[in-house]
Image (cartoon, grey):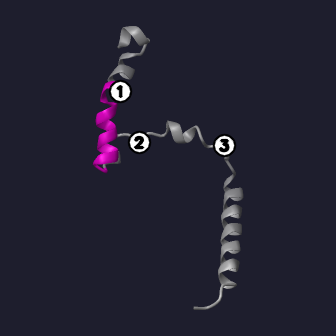
Amino acid sequence: MRRNTGLTWTQVLMAANTPVLLSATMANGRPEAGLMPSGQVAGLIDDLPSCADLIARITSEAEQILTALAQLPSP
């Protein structure tokens, strides 16, 4: 595998151990003993607001939801 791909020995060893490391995390619930895949999800992130903007969005959405709930008829 190393000759054909140009990978380092570390990369080859990690590739060989990936199924075991994923299993430890995902199947056995032990993230400290394995790894968690993140590449596919990270590629979908296209919005990186500042902390202040994120808090403002959360607060605004919560206020909208609370207003809508307050307008519902009582059971």
Quadrant occupied by the C terminus: bottom right
* Amino acid tagged 3: Asp
* Amino acid tagged 2: Met
Q: Residue at x 71, y 57 (%)?
A: 53
Q: Is residue 63 left or right of residue 38?
A: right
Outermost residue toward the top in this view:
3
Residue 5 figure quarter: top left
Mark seen at residue 14: 1
Kind of element beneath mark 3:
loop
Q: Which residues are magenta?
A: 14-29
Q: CA distance from mark 1 to mark 2?
A: 13 Å
Residue 74 figure quarter: bottom right
Q: Which residue is mark 3?
A: 46
- In the image, residue 16 lies at what x, y percent? 31, 25
Q: Which residue is mark 2?
A: 36
- Is 33 in the magenta? no
* Amino acid tagged 1: Met
Quadrant occupied by the N terminus: top left
Q: CA distance from mark 1 to mark 3?
A: 29 Å
Examine the rendered structure and indicate whether residue 20 appears above or below residue 12. below
Q: Is residue 64 left or right of residue 23?
A: right
